[in-house]
Amino acid sequence: MSTQTFTLPDVGEGLTEAEIVAWKVAPGDAVAVNDVICEIETAKSLVELPSPHAGMVGELLVEEGRTIDVGTPIITFLTEAEAAAPAPAAPEAPAAASGSVLVGYGNGGEAVSRRRKPAERPVRSSAGVIAKPPIRKLARDLGVDLTTVTPTGADGEIVRDDVMRVASQASVFRNIQTPEWGDVREETVPAPAPAPVGLARGIQPVGDPARTEAIPVKGVRKASANAMVQSAYSAPHVTVWKEVDATRTMELVRRLKASPDFADIKVSPLLIMARAVIWAVRRTPMVNAAWIDTDGGAEIAVRHYVNLGIAAATPRGLIVPNIKDAQELGMKDLARALNRLTVTAREGRTTPADQQGGTITITNIGVFGMDAGTPIINPGEAGIVAMGTIAQKPWVVDGEVRPRWVTTVAGSFDHRVIDGDGMSRFVADVAAVLEEPALLVD
């Protein structure tokens, strides 16, 4: 009988390291093949690792919050035969400790642990709370104590809206929901203590915890930062924009929401924007191309399909999942795909495969109250389109000033791939559809 050791696998293409975010088992827990043993954060997303063995958990070899290389041992298992066998006598061994109970997985039973003392392990205070793992993770990211949340789900289950309601009472978590700006726009910063003798006014000691906080750059944040720097300094960006009367788009959204065909589907202006981008790509294919460096120089790859990326701000950082072959989807299927993409991203379940192979991206900065911006192109693409907030403004219609729903469409493009006339034509086409969605009928 031998102990089985499981090492961190490569769960994506070219993964070299990952962070152990949360263990879902404890020493002494019984597990079956494919039971989730832990959550890891890669450079792309949060991933659940399944157990490769059936039996009993022996030792957790890596503590939560630590980043390790692929191939590092992370957990040991006792085979079913070994788990059933009595432990050998060991006079010097520590007394058996109670296995920690991880909420949602039942009692771990008794086991001898070679890990840190139980008293050193974090105490999980949400025992008895009914909530799915993604909801528990969301609560942890937002700093919400699940024992203080009033459940509204079936059979007393805590759902996402319950957690968000509690979080919003304390502060606005702008990466998850549209900002709810309050009356106070700035936080009051306490006056600093007098500087020690010998320090000039305004100069603070290095490492003063009252003035600064160090946030490790890792995981999704690290990958996103590297990608943005690579894109910004390798592709010559050009941004163009156009203000649009989107009143007819808002009317279409209202009609779709009232339609029985869309009764179970969330509909927003982003749906019309997505259809507009797909329609405009067909008329200007170069915005959907990519600059490829080769041994002999370079070439431009023109894609005759649209893997539509949607930039998503999540608790763990910016990610850009994409809808594969979006050009093949009708309005209803595209709406469903957008819903799935959004929910999956917010719950931290976006896979590396969902983020690979994008051809053009939309970033909806309007949800944060922004009118326009100069977005950075997603690496491997030649264009990104930003949709600003939609608000009522005075607009001249047939010689008269009327209140209309107005937005701004902005696009950044790789000037190596597409020239100014193509960029302008593409943004004008997107704007034309938002102004008159009937153009999509063709």
Image (tube, helix red, strand yellow):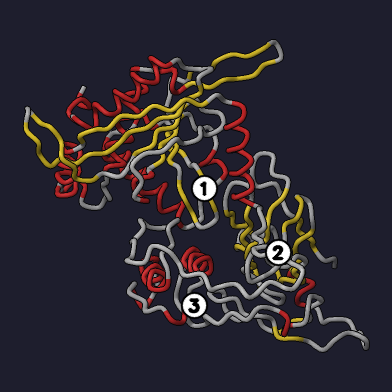
Across and down, in percent, residue 298 comes to 63, 14
| Visible residue check, residue 423 | yes
Across and down, in percent, residue 268 comes to 27, 46
- Of residue 433 and residue 198, the one placed in the foreground of this image is 198
**Which mark is first along the chain, 3 or 1?**
3
Q: Quadrant of residue 428?
A: top left
Residue 145's mark?
3
Q: Residue at x 47, y 50 (%)?
A: 313
CA–CA distance between discs 1 and 3? Answer: 25 Å
CA–CA distance between discs 2 and 1? Answer: 39 Å
Residue 392 relative to residue 288: left or right: left
Q: Element at badge 1?
A: strand
Residue at the disc numbered 2: 200
**Which mark is first along the chain, 1 or 2?**
2
Comparing labels 2 and 3, the label whose residue is closer to the camera: 2
Residue 433 relative to residue 14: left or right: left
Q: Are marks 2 and 1 in contact (CB under 8 Å)?
A: no
- The three-letter code of the residue at mark 2 reads Ala
Crowd rating for badge 3 (residues with CA inside 10 Å; few <14, some 14–19, many 20+): some
Q: Are marks 2 and 3 in contact (CB under 8 Å)?
A: no
Q: Quadrant of residue 115?
A: bottom right
